[in-house]
């Protein structure tokens, strides 16, 4: 069943009646203050968000710069290429008492 | 235009007083359009504020004050559409969902308080709202902008930024669906 021409006209009349049933309406007294409150609230949120983003970007840039500087600096004291035991012995030569120090063999000693 | 271009230009440059004047000039008409698009009187003011809020933060994107009205209509259409979509996700109890007996009882109670023509208008609003349930929110808004707001296809083309022919096809299909729903309702009335 297809809509007829009569239905078409009736629908037009109904839509026109709908226009009349929903006239332009007066806003309440609270409309403008409410609108400005919403604008201020959105503006504050946007401002805080922008500040937060700006702070985050600055901090990220600073950290990146610091890492870049750290990585690009030449090593002042390159790691010594010695074994652990040699390094330990070198580190303890001055303070180590005689009896725990490395054993020395005096081959010229009389009686040997 | 309800305001002159110079006022729009000043509002665009951040003049709050000029923006205020623009809102004062357009708010009644905008609220009327929203009322017809969403058919919920209690939420009209809230949606209208949303329209002007969006206007405030998007005025700098307006190319020329000459296209201010289509721009405002565009914001109105988008806000109404967003509202209708939200409403669909959050279904509420509406008169069109009631049984006939419940409607008669509600009418009888309301009859003592509301005048006859007010009741008639309410019935028309409910009928149209119910018929428009046959189409999507987007088509509902488009159909109302054309048939009830009386905008021409050329004006709609500016608002929607869609070719006139595409709008024609969409409008035709939407109208056919509504007509079908209308015809079904008519037959139901005749039989019942």
Image: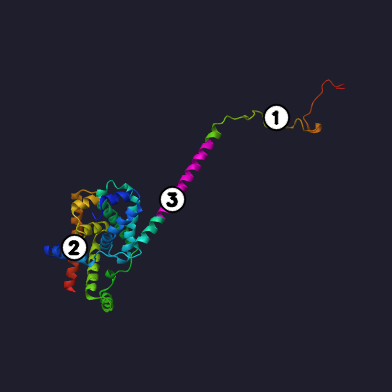
In the picture, measured across the screen, residue B82 lies left or right of residue B154, that is right
Q: Chain of mark 2?
A: B
In the picture, measured across the screen, residue A57 lies left or right of residue B140, that is right
Q: Look at the numbered disc 3 and give the secondary structure of its residue.
A: helix
Pointer 3 residue: A47
Q: Position of residue B143 (x, y in %)?
A: 21, 58
In the picture, measured across the screen, residue A106 lies left or right of residue B82, that is right
> In which quadrant is the C terminus of chain A drawn?
top right
Q: Residue at x 12, y 65 (%)?
A: A6
Q: Is residue B26 visible?
A: no
**Picture layout, residue A42 above or below residue A82:** below
**Picture layout, residue B13 above or below residue A14:** above
Work out whether disc 2 and disc 3 sit on a shared chain.
no
Q: Is residue A81 magenta?
A: no
Q: Is residue A49 magenta?
A: yes
Work out whether disc 3 and disc 1 sit on a shared chain.
yes
Q: Position of residue B92 (x, y in %)?
A: 33, 67
Q: Residue at x 21, y 52 (%)?
A: B155
Pointer 1 residue: A86
Q: Position of residue A109 (x, y in %)?
A: 85, 22
Marks 2 and 1, how far apart in space?
A: 97 Å
Main secondary-structure element of the magenta-colored stretch? helix
Magenta region, residue range:
A41-67
Viewer-proximal residue, B64 or A3? B64
Pointer 2 residue: B180
Viewer-proximal residue, A58 or A10? A58
Marks 3 and 1, how far apart in space?
A: 62 Å
Q: Look at the numbered disc 1 and give the secondary structure of its residue.
A: helix
> In which quadrant is the N terminus of chain A drawn?
bottom left
Kindly report which numbered mark, 3 or 1, lies closer to the viewer in this rendering. 3
Kindly report which numbered mark, 2 or 1, lies closer to the viewer in this rendering. 2
């Amino acid at each position: 069943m297809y809509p007829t021409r009569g239905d078409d006209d009736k629908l037009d009349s109904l839509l026109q009646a709908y226009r009349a049933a929903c006239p332009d309406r007066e806003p309440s007294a609270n409309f403008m203050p409410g609108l400005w409150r919403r604008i201020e609230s959105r503006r504050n949120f946007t401002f805080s968000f922008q500040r937060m983003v700006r702070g985050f970007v600055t901090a990220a840039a600073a950290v990146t710069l610091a890492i870049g500087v750290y990585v690009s600096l030449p090593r002042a004291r390159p790691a010594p290429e010695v074994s652990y035991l040699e390094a330990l012995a070198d580190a303890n030569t001055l303070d180590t008492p005689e009896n725990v120090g490395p054993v020395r063999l005096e081959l010229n000693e009389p009686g040997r | 235009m309800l305001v002159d271009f110079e006022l729009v230009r000043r509002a665009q440059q951040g003049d709050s007083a000029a923006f205020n004047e623009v809102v004062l000039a357009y708010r009644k008409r905008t609220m009327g359009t929203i009322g017809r698009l969403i058919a919920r009187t209690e939420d009209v003011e809230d949606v209208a504020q949303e329209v002007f809020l969006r206007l405030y933060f998007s005025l700098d994107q307006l190319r020329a004050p000459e296209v201010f009205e289509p721009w405002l209509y565009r914001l109105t259409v988008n806000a109404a559409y967003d509202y209708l979509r939200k409403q669909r996700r959050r279904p509420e109890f509406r008169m069109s969902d009631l049984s006939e007996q419940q409607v008669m009882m509600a009418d009888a109670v309301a009859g003592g308080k509301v005048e006859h023509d007010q009741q008639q208008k309410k019935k028309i609003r409910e009928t149209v709202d119910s018929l428009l349930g046959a189409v999507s929110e987007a088509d509902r808004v488009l159909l109302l902008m054309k048939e009830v707001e009386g905008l021409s296809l050329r004006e709609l083309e500016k608002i929607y930024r869609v070719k006139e022919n595409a709008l024609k096809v969409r409008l035709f299909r939407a109208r056919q669906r509504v007509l079908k729903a209308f015809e079904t309702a008519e037959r139901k009335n005749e039989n019942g």
